[in-house]
Amino acid sequence: MRLSLFNRLQLRPTAPALSMLRSSISLVQNAGYKIYSKPKKVARKIPVSPPSLLPANTHPIIYITDQLKKDLDPTGWRRKLFERSSDICVKPGDVIRVLFRGESRDAFTGTIMGIKRAGLDTSVRLRSEVAQVGIELSVKVYSTSVENFEFISRATKRARRAKLYYLRPDERK
């Protein structure tokens, strides 16, 4: 007999009956058998997320991108230099000089072969010739290793291509 049987019959077990029931349960458990009962349902607490640090109605990726642009380009000059709608926008065929940070303060001057506009990943491919050897360099505009871009000259004619790969010599000759 179990306690649940007493509950089903709505009988009140007497103290000797309860002690006998408990001793029989302990004998069964000592013999190596386990008495299973239904597990009690525990109310699950739903965790509450902390309030958002973003301003209301703001997409997180756009917000982070804007913050990074402010940190990497506080004056907005790089953005203006490589944005199509800007007055001082550089185009393929223009000549610019890139100054790099560091102890050596290297500089690279070259013709813009192409501009890849992709937000923070905007990059420029420059080509220069040194001792009849062509050198191409791809530079990320918002890179922390780039200190400054200096505009040298505009192209003599407007380029009719977005990527000036024809500046490379023909390998078939």
Image: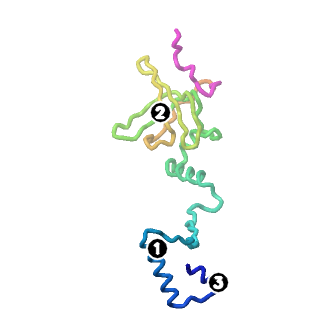
What stretch of residues is rendered in magenta?
159-173
Q: Disc 1 vs disc 2: Cβ atoms closer than 8 Å?
A: no
Question: Crowding near pointer 1: few (<14 within 10 Å), some, many (20+)?
Answer: few
Going from the N terminus, do you reach mark 2 or mark 3 first?
3
Residues under numbered marks 1 and 3 in contact, where contact means CB atoms less than 8 Å apart:
no
Q: How many marks?
A: 3
Q: Measuring 49% from the left and 84% from the top, which residue is drawn there?
A: 20
Q: Give the residue pinned by disc 3.
A: 9
Residue at figure coordinates x 37%, y 37% from the top left: 105
| Magenta-drawn stretch, dominant element (helix, strand or loop) | loop
Relative depth, front residue between 38 and 78: 38
Q: Give, as a three-letter code, the residue at label 2.
A: Arg
Disc 1 versus disc 3: distance between alpha carbons? 23 Å
Q: CA distance from mark 2 to mark 3?
A: 95 Å
Residue 108 in the image, given as x and y percentages of width and height: 44, 31
Q: Which residue is mark 1?
A: 28
Which numbered disc, 1 or 3, marks the residue that appears first in the sequence? Answer: 3
Residue toward you, 142 or 44 = 44
Mark nearer the viewer, 1 or 2: 1
**Percent position of residue 168, x then y:** 52, 19
Reply yes or no: does residue 156 show up in magenta: no
Residue 25: x and y, percent?
Answer: 48, 77
Other residues around mark 3 within 10 Å, as few (<14) / some (14–19) / many (≥20): few
In which quadrant will I find the N terminus?
bottom right
Regarding mark 1 in the picture, which secondary structure is present there? helix
Q: Kindly report the distance in space between the C-alpha atoms of the residues bearing marks 1 and 2.
A: 89 Å
Question: Badge 2 is on which residue?
Answer: 97
The image position of residue 14, as x and y in percent, is 54, 91
Q: Secondary structure at mark 3?
A: helix
What residue is drawn where x is 41% and y is 18%? Answer: 131
